[in-house]
Amino acid sequence: MLRLALTLKRNLPRLAGYAMIPLIRAVFRLSRALGPERAGDAGAALLRALGPWLPSHRTALANLRAALPDLTESDVRRIAREAWDNLGRTGAEYAHLDTLFDYDPANHATQRMEVEGIEHFFALRDDGRPGLVFSAHLANWELPAICAAKFDLEATAVFRAPNNPAAARLVQEVRRKTMGGLAASGPGGAFAMQGVVERGGHLGQLIDQHFTRGVVVTFFERPCLANPLLAKLARHYDCPVHGARVVRLPGGRFRLTLTPPLDLPRDADGQIDVAGAMQAMTGVVEGWVRENPGQWLWMHRRWRPNMLPKPLARV
């Protein structure tokens, strides 16, 4: 009996997550029925109301005060509410990812998407070389991978599954229908990602979250850890690295921008410097966030000083 109780206690979060599958699917169907604009408005209203009561709201406020110290307290709280608004819209839009990206280079009249730097995208697709694309949790961050699939760019998106198994299963189903290849981050994932580039494919990754085994970069003048995978691959294969960002526009519209290839710093041997490359990419992301702070995921614990590498003791 005791063993059964311990087993139930250990598996309770997972069981609760699976029990939520019918509820999450019902919300998904409701969002689908509402359409992208009304579903987005509903998701935004819900999280603008609930978000400030969640523990992660304190994280968002602390991050904003430290990263943007010149803001007034009212601006800090306004941007935090905007971040919840964006997160609610993004969640509701998962039900519409198969129709949300409607960009057509030949017809700009009625579409909700606009794309800047499409020539860089076509160059990536047609140059016969592997390529790397970094992005960040801005606006609806799923759209660059959908763009790649729509225009036949052989690309694999690196993703981290949600902690809730019900949400993870549903998100995975949606991504498989709308995107190209998918690679789960985690143990052993780096080998699969290296294989993508080795075969001449393209790899996309969100680089704006904490990575325990990462390299130290400066983000908003504060040190944090970044996943060095893209920089290591760029160094090994000497392939182009582009940035892709999404901006949420009024009226349920989006702008997706692909940058030219970055001129990454190199060491004395002419090879790409891993730490310097990650700092360059992080600097681009910081510029994006400064332009649209209310569309970034401030609730994430991006800065964790206690987990930075300790300096070596002097001998």
Image (tube, grey):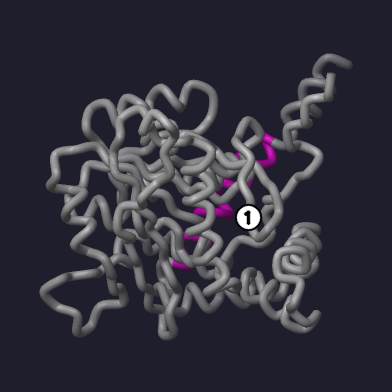
Residue 208 shows in the view: yes
290 shown above or below 158 = below
Q: Is 300 displayed left or right of 66 in the figure?
A: left
Pick whichever, 133 or 254, lies toward us: 133
Asked if residue 279 lies left or right of residue 247, the reply is right
Q: Main secondary structure of the magenta part?
A: helix
Q: Write down the residue under mark 1.
A: 219
Of 1 and 315, which appears nearest the observer? 315
Q: Nearer the viewer, residue 264 or 34?
A: 264
Query: What type is the residue that disc 1 sits on?
Result: Phe
Query: Which residue sits at x=22%, y=64%?
Result: 118
Residues in magenta? 14-31
Dot 1 falls on a residue whose secondary structure is: strand
Residue 134 in percent (x, y) is at 42, 49
Where does the C terminus fall, quadrant-wise? top right
**In the rendered view, would you say 183 is above or below 262?**
above
Instruction: Residue 229: say if magenta.
Output: no
